[in-house]
Amino acid sequence: MNPLRSLILAAADNDAVRRAVAGAPVSRDVVRRFVAGETTADAISATRALVADGLSVTLDHLGEDTRDRATAERTVGAYLELLDLLHAEGLARHAEVSVKLSAVGQALGEDAALTGASRICAAAEQCGTTVTLDMEDHTTTDSTLRVLAELRRTWPSVGAVLQAYLRRTGDDCLALAGPGSRVRLCKGAYAEPADVAFASPHEVDLNYVRCVNALLAGDGYPMFATHDPRLVEIVGERARWYGREPGTYEHQMLYGIRPVEQTRLAAQGHVVRVYVPYGRQWYGYLMRRLAERPANSAFFLRALATRS
Ligand SMILES: Cc1cc2nc3c(=O)[nH]c(=O)nc-3n(C[C@H](O)[C@H](O)[C@H](O)COP(=O)(O)OP(=O)(O)OC[C@H]3O[C@@H](n4cnc5c(N)ncnc54)[C@H](O)[C@@H]3O)c2cc1C
């Protein structure tokens, strides 16, 4: 892994660094580039603008690593409020929600996460939309897939996320490529040990392509989450090879990253879904985005330097 990337991901867990970055005046501008805003109203207006451009949306209420029941409850409440508003504004057909189980209480026990996620899935169904469970670091993969399987017994449309950097993911793709199964494939955003994850970008890309093939060959609905121009092209080529029409799979990208490419693909008739994060807990999310492109991290290094 790029040493600056490892440094940023390691520093992301440090409280002093967190305070320095959150307080740095330049942070606001960087945050605005990647995060739709702090409130539900901000999330709705970003969604409305993207939908007007022919894009679909998945909304993430920022927050992770919830350690107490009150915070987990507030997170579930935020999603319920968001879903109500999406429905009221006529946006639910174009916008679903992405949920991190750690935000709804996975650390308090799998049952807590299942209960919280179930309430969000029930509300999403009532509002005419769906839920995708984000995937977090590898220590949570088995638990997240167990909760997914349980949720799908009632709500078969709940989406999974698989990370191409994990060595296990080829097998997970085969297991989750069944009829109707919505699976987002991404590279993976966490610092992982070499015994569970491929270390070199080349190996991750190769595994991504293997997984693209496995998902397109199956009967599910794959969602290819990457900004990588080469992989976007390979997805298009493999989709044609497997006889997949646009609409039987989709592209996904993050809010604020390659927006021109997002609208270009949509104009060609592809389904393109933009992952829109919002809320006050933007720190962990922002650090992962900066770690992916250390070239954009000058502000982060300045914040560190002014501390010392
Ligand atoms: C919709 C969506 C949902 C996600 N959900 C999860 C999740 O649940 N769990 C998880 O671990 N990770 C998730 N991720 C993050 C993902 O794992 C990667 O960390 C992230 O997408 C960066 O990988 P990449 O495929 O874009 O390629 P990278 O290897 O980061 O970049 C490859 C190439 O893409 C282009 N590119 C990348 N970023 C930019 C940029 N800012 N501007 C211009 N070009 C750029 C460049 O050409 C670059 O060389 C998600 C990503 C997306 C898009």
Image (tube, rainbow, N blue to C red):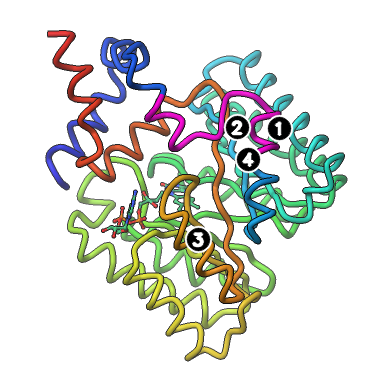
Q: Would you call the spot at circle 1 few (<14 residues within 10 Å), some (14-19), or many (20 or more)?
A: many
Report how far apart the C-alphas of labels 4 and 1 lie in the structure. 16 Å
User: Would you name the residue on which mark 4 appears?
Assistant: 46
Secondary structure at badge 3 equals helix
Going from the N terminus, do you reach mark 2 or mark 3 first? 2
Mark 1: amino acid? Tyr
Mark 2 touches mark 4? (CB < 8 Å): no
User: Would you name the residue on which mark 2 appears?
Assistant: 61
Going from the N terminus, do you reach mark 1 or mark 3 first? 1
Residue in the foreground of this view, choosing between 86 and 79: 86
Q: Is residue 272 left or right of residue 128?
A: left
Residue in the foreground of this view, choosing between 169 and 54: 54
Secondary structure at badge 2 equals strand
Mark 3: amino acid? Gln
Mark 4: amino acid? Ala
Q: Quadrant of residue 206?
A: bottom left
Q: Quadrant of residue 127?
A: top right
**Can you tell which of label 1 and label 3 is closer to the viewer?**
3
Measuring from the top left, give residue 16's x and y in whole percent.
Answer: 27, 10
Mark 2 touches mark 3? (CB < 8 Å): no
Mark 2 touches mark 1? (CB < 8 Å): yes
